[in-house]
Amino acid sequence: MSKGTHDGRMILLGLVLLVTGCAADSGAGYRPIVDTGNPAYAPEVRARLESDLAACQQLAEQRSYFNGNRLEEMALGTAVGSGIGLANDRQWGSVGAGAGIGLAAVGVMGALETRNERQKIVTDCLKGRGHPVIL
């Protein structure tokens, strides 16, 4: 195994571990800060906070990590990574390592973006139900 292929596999392994860590915090379980001391916070709305939070978190889970946009981005990342690997030393090992790195890099970015989108869904949903969400 060439040094470039070994380095590529180590980078790929690192990115896979990072994606796994990101997936553990999917964003759907996000618990935003709610200003429960706000004088305009109606008591009947405050009483629904936990049930509304659970419903909003469930709604956020509907935002899939592997939606059409992510799959297209991952395919593009794989193609670009393959091209870089081929341009690097024109060996199949480098092409495979480049493809893996491109796929993993785009996967990490997509996972982070989806996590943020899910957190925003929870926040927007709670605001829409009358809760004074700060963050």
Image (tube, helix red, strand yellow):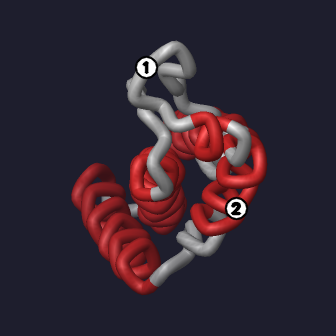
Residue in front for this viewpoint, 7 or 44: 44
Write the residue at 34% across / 71% down.
73
The tag on residue 39 is 1
Residue that appears at 59% across and 45% down: 45
**Badge nearest the viewer, 1 or 2:** 1
Q: Disc 1 or 2, which lies upstream in sequence?
A: 1
Instruction: Tell me the quadrant of the picture where the N terminus can be found.
Output: top right
- Is residue 81 at least partly visible in the picture? yes
- Quick one: which residue is furthest to the top in this view? 37
Looking at the picture, how far across and down is residue 88, in whole percent? 28, 50
- In the rendering, at what x and y percent does residue 112 appear? 47, 45
- Please say if the residues under marks 1 and 2 sit with CB atoms less than 8 Å apart: no
Instruction: Classify 10 Å Cα crowding around label 2: few (below 14), some (14-19), many (20 and above).
Output: some
Q: Height in image: 104 above or below 63?
A: above
Q: Quadrant of residue 69?
A: bottom left
Residue furthest to the left:
87
The quarter of the picture where the C terminus appears is top left
Tell me the distance, in whole angstroms, between the alpha carbons under discs 1 and 2.
Answer: 24 Å
- Front residue of 81/61: it is 61
Quick one: SS at disc 2? helix
- Residue 120 % position (x, y): 42, 49
Q: Quadrant of residue 3?
A: top right
Numbered marks: total: 2
| Residue at the (52%, 59%) spot, across then down | 100
Q: Amino acid at mark 1?
A: Pro
The amino acid on which the numbered mark 2 sits, given as a three-letter code, is Ala
Residue 82 in picture, x, y percent from top left:
36, 66
Element on which disc 1 rests: loop
Q: 33 left or right of 1?
A: left
Q: Which residue is mark 2?
A: 55
